[in-house]
Amino acid sequence: MEGERFYIDLEKAVAEVESKLTNTSYVTAYPVLIMLSGLPGTGKSYLARKLCEKIPFVVVESDFVRKTLFNPPTYSPRESALVHRVCHILIDRFLKKGLRVIFDATNLSEVHREYVYRLADKNNAKLVIVQTVAPEEVVRERLEKRHKARDDHDISDADWEVYSRMKQYQQPISRPHIVVDTSRDLEEEIQKILRVLQR
């Protein structure tokens, strides 16, 4: 879809993204939503992939949704609003089916996170909020590397300038959450998250 074509068929957009997602058949009796929150370069998508190596999750990644629907993306406010609308519809749909879902987006403002909290509550899903962090020198190195030797799984366009700008808008998370420093060994943190899911 063209970057500025906003009068699109929403259901068609949702179906297009859904058709490209994996692990959509692993239905459980207890739906789970892991909401990731963190600035660019703090390791959200890497953590999501590592969690998927342990148990099947459907990963709803805002960058993936954006690039599926908009080529090239403009990152305009209207485009971002549509991207998150599609993400929320998919999360709601998957939780209704009884799937385990990871929402991979920056989720920096509490007003945006509140909507995700309500989706979990509405579907009686266990909500686990995970905030990813990393020392700024590590983040800068990762973001610079992104433009030199990009990891095959890394589809984000965010650079250090975007990180610095978004940092101003990061708000505290009001609900209990797990903080994961992705510059350290993740195995212990992943096990901690999985233990919380099983409670």
Image (cartoon, helix red, strand yellow):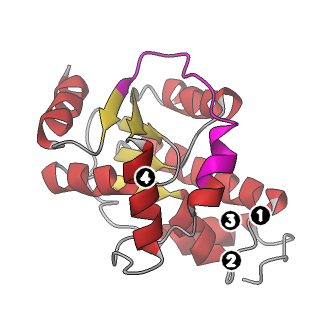
Identify the mark nearer the N-term, 4 or 2: 2
**Circles 4 and 2 in contact, beta carbons < 8 Å:** no
Identify the mark nearer the N-term, 2 or 1: 2
Mark 4, Cα crowd under 10 Å, few <14 / some 14-19 / many 20+, is many
Identify the mark nearer the N-term, 4 or 3: 3
Residue labelled with disc 4 = 139
The secondary structure type at the circle numbered 3 is helix
The secondary structure type at the circle numbered 4 is helix
Q: Is residue 86 visible?
A: no
**Circles 2 and 1 in contact, beta carbons < 8 Å:** yes
Point 40% across, 71% down: residue: 145
Mark 2, Cα crowd under 10 Å, few <14 / some 14-19 / many 20+, is some
Residue labelled with disc 1 = 79
Residue at the front extreme of this rendering:
137
Kind of residue indicated by mark 1: Glu
The secondary structure type at the circle numbered 1 is helix
Secondary structure character of the magenta stretch overall: loop
Residue labelled with disc 3 = 11
Residue labelled with disc 2 = 70
Q: Nearer the viewer, residue 195 or 15?
A: 195
Q: Which residues are magenta?
A: 163-178
* Residue 83 % position (x, y): 67, 59
Kind of residue indicated by mark 2: Phe
Horizontal placement of 184 versus 87: left or right?
Answer: left
Identify the mark nearer the N-term, 1 or 4: 1
